[in-house]
Image (spheres, rainbow, N blue to C red):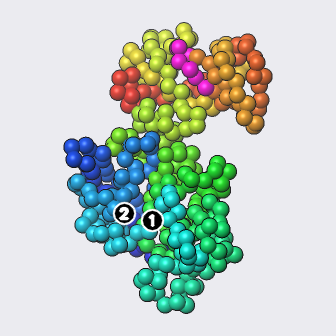
Amino acid sequence: MALDTANQSGLALEIKTLRKSYGEVDVLHDIDVQMAEGEFLVLVGPSGCGKSTLLNCIAGLEETTGGQLFIGGRDVIEEPPKDRDIAMVFQSYALYPTMTVAENIGFGMKIRRVPKEQAKAKVDEVAKMLQIEQLLNRQPSQLSGGQRQRVAMGRALVREPKLYLFDEPLSNLDAKLRVEMRAEIKKLHRTTGASIVYVTHDQIEAMTLASRIVVLKDGYVQQIGTPQEIYETPANTFVADFMGSPPMNLIPAQVTDAGVMLDGTPLQVSVPGNPAEVIVGLRPEHIVIDPASPFSVTPTLIENTGAECYVGFELNGKPVTARAPGRMDESRAEPIPVRFVTESLSFFDSESGVLLR
């Protein structure tokens, strides 16, 4: 299905110093985002961070307090939702219960008076893409949650707009179905080349779906980058702790002439600016069980998940998690020799939490 999203700017979405307030309460602070055509942009953050409010501002469902907003190179800040050339998929499926699947998918085209044969061909095309062509004569009450979500997506896809907006579309599904639908959405994006803005609080969804991620906290953008950039070089301790499962270990440490001290053992690494104290960031997979290492830790918890296990212990009085392949005896209490992949360490300012290296 070819999508025509050509515009002179080459951007599907551009947000400039966008602000949103409710009375005296500021909920979005000078948001700046640029999104290329065909990109899959994910807005992620904890509850109350402003991601759904930002999506609603893009859709025109919320009025902005200030700033500029362009969709397909066109200024839409004063336009109502119906004129913004967008299609939205909600957390609730919002299907018409008395209509069949085909009628639900084609309802927007009926309102726009698209000729019947043309509309039917488009419904059939989208249903085939979403693998729901055998469900077209059913009503929503006869569908599973995943099937209903596909119908909601189909209703958006027949539009072929400049921009698709997804508001936590998988949050009502069980864990297994979420994984399946995640794969379907990724495949759909690859097939259509659509420009998608996707809101989620689930950092796994963000990491697996996004071309780029916008991490939000308290209405402020914390970092914008590819999943790899966000994971490997988080801009601050919030991003480091929020993105990753398990999250990055954050360990306060002293910096001496001998190196960065972890439980009395110096790590021979340099820290920009030579601060006296830092927060060491260490991903669980960068703590490696190594019988040849002189450094050992005493496990406080061992969790076997099947193909790998998580080992909990303490460093500098803080709980730390290591990820290791295979299985371990969960009752093990004797020390485990480990080494740290020092080239993969991150260092954050001990006061501001901003990345130093």
Residue 119 to residue 158: above or below: below
Q: Main secondary structure of the magenta part?
A: strand
As helix, strand or loop, the secondary structure at mark 2 comes to: helix
Number of residues whose C-alpha sits closer than 10 Å to that of mark 1, classed few (under 14), some (14–19) or many (20 or more): many
* Left or right: residue 6 compared with residue 107: left
Nearer-the-camera pick, 294 or 163:
163
Q: Quadrant of the N terminus?
A: bottom right
Residue 119 to residue 253: above or below: below
Q: Quadrant of the C terminus?
A: top left
Q: Does 32 appear in magenta? A: no
As helix, strand or loop, the secondary structure at mark 1 comes to: strand
Q: Position of residue 36 (x, y in %)?
A: 41, 61
Q: Position of residue 259 (x, y in %)?
A: 49, 15
Residue found at x 50% / y 25% = 250
Q: Which residue is mark 2?
A: 59
Amino acid, disc 2? Ala
Q: Which residue is mark 1?
A: 88
Q: How many marks?
A: 2
Residue found at x 57% / y 31% = 283
Q: Is residue 33 in view from this perspective? A: yes
Q: Does 320 appear in magenta? A: yes
Separation of residues labelled 2 and 1 (CA atoms): 8 Å
Residue found at x 40% / y 69% = 86
Nearer-the-camera pick, 172 or 28:
172
Amino acid, disc 1? Met
Nearer-the-camera pick, 121 or 17:
121
* Left or right: residue 309 compared with residue 265: right
Q: Position of residue 146 (x, y in %)?
A: 63, 61
- Which residue range is magenta in the image? 315-321
Say whether marks 2 and 1 touch (CB < 8 Å).
yes
What label sits on residue 331 in the rendered view?
A: none
Residue 81 location, quadrant: bottom left
